[in-house]
Amino acid sequence: MELSAEVEGQISQWRRYVSSHPTVAGSDVEELEDHLRSQIDDLRDVGLDDGEAFLVAVKRMGRMDDMWREFASEHSDRLWKQLVLPSGHSSESATDQRGLIAAVGTAVAAGVATVALVNGIGTDFDSDPDGLIPRNIILVVLAFVAGFLAIKRQISGWPVVATAGAFIASFAATNLYPFSFVDGHTAALTAIHLPIMLWFFIGLIYVEGDWKNHDKRMDFIRFTGEVFVYYTLMALGGGVLLGVTGGAFAAIGLDPESLIFEVLLPGGAAAAAVVAVWLVEIKQGAIENIAPVLTRVFTPLFALIFAGFLATVLVTGRGVDNDPEVLILFDLILVVVLGLHLYSLSARQPGDEPGLFDYMQLALVVSALLIDMLVMFGILGRISEFGFSANKTAALGENLVLLVNLAVAAFLSLAFVRGARSWAKVERWQTTYVPVYPVWAAVVAFVFPFVFDFV
């Protein structure tokens, strides 16, 4: 029995959606469509009309994300072949080739520009006491990453203009602000916070300017975690490669130090950033699940360590040492915890009931909240003792930003495990709060130098 034209159109749309994923070949699509049509026929036999039968059949086939994981598991050899080779479909092949060409060209350009910066005008790291080279290198690499994404996703218009303006302002602040590099801190604060701000402008390109879209912001959060994981893996491999290179040259009586530290290391690190982004982009439909998987391993470990730490504080009555290095260490730990929370959100199925892992997440967030409060007391203690400075004010603001996030996340997570709130509320809070981070980073990078007289 033939289906209505409306349902045939819906099946065509479903087929195009399935075909867009790199794990699914043409024969797989045919198999899935046969299964879908069989389900529809069975449902029509029991009295459903065409439209109702289509909706129920799609629902019965399960979540598409589960299907991608099943295909990835069954066809892993195909995934790795597709890492560099085109998929075989003419339109997808052309897109893959363009992406590969753009990635290689941008990566090479980033590497060459970085090496030129390191070695330009007779300057090297040893004769750069103010750290202008490393501060500019980060901006240069991020500029090439932004350019690659704009080319890869064919983005133009206001997102590109806004991102370009942010990079121009960042280069100007880095090189034109009259920083005091003797006993000064605002130069370092600007160098640290500008990349944070710029990464979110890169996110503006990633979401194609649709920053208000909740789902796209969550996609960018996933993308960020995957890029970090891929880049870390590539850095480890690159370290091994440089070690082998050094040993090989030393074996024939040559000193490769200049080659490694002035060419291979800076050039390779810059190029790897673009390559990491490309790898995540090209494989996002198939193997973009590394960061959330890691959260399953580290969440219980961090929860146990934090619980033990808080118990020790309670028993001994000792607070967090207000030494600057200690406070910075705790801030970094809290950022890692927030990352674990974010990527657990990105991996969770919205309809699942609260489980053991959700209780672990709640324990982790609550523990992080309490530790953040201890750190806040430590920072306030230093301010009361020594007064305000650029570093202490920035640390206070950053901990306040984290405190608000963790407090609301803890409240919503508790409501979720009690059945009073949906998981979507917990997730939406994080994506809604995302713009706070680049705004604060911009304030520290651009405003603090003036407030504290560039010291």
Image (cartoon, helix red, strand yellow):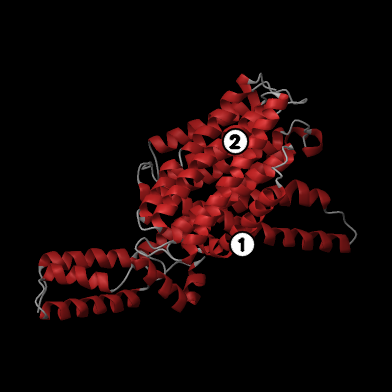
- SS state under label 1: helix
For the residue pair 133 and 66, the one nearer the viewer reads as 66
Query: Of circles 2 and 1, which is in front?
Result: 1
The N terminus appears in which quarter of the rendering? bottom left
Q: Position of residue 24 (x, y in %)?
A: 38, 71
Q: Which mark is residue 193?
A: 2
Q: Is residue 63 visible?
A: yes
Q: Secondary structure at mark 2?
A: helix
Instruction: Say if 159 sits above or below 48 in the image.
Output: above
Which residue appears at 58% of the width and 54% of the height?
228
Please report the residue visible at 12 percent of the width from the left and 71 percent of the height from the top: 50
Q: Is residue 254 above or below residue 139?
A: below
Residue 107 lies, with reference to residue 452, above or below; the image says below
Looking at the rendered structure, the kind of residue marked 1 is Leu
Residue under the point 41% across and 67% down: 22
**Residue 287 visible, this orientation:** no
Q: Label 2: how many residues lie within 10 Å, few (<14), some (14-19) or many (20+)?
A: some
Q: Residue at x 39, y 35 (%)?
A: 158
Residue 127, label in figure: none
Separation of marks 2 and 1 at Cα, in angstroms: 29 Å
Label 1 crowd (10 A; few <14 / some 14-19 / many >=20): some
Residue type at the position of mark 2: His
> Residue 16, position in %: x, y?
28, 64
Residue 341 position in % (x across, y down): 51, 54
Looking at the rendered image, the quarter that the C terminus falls into is: top right
Q: Earlier in the sequence, mark 2 or mark 1?
A: 2
**Residue 301: which disc?**
1
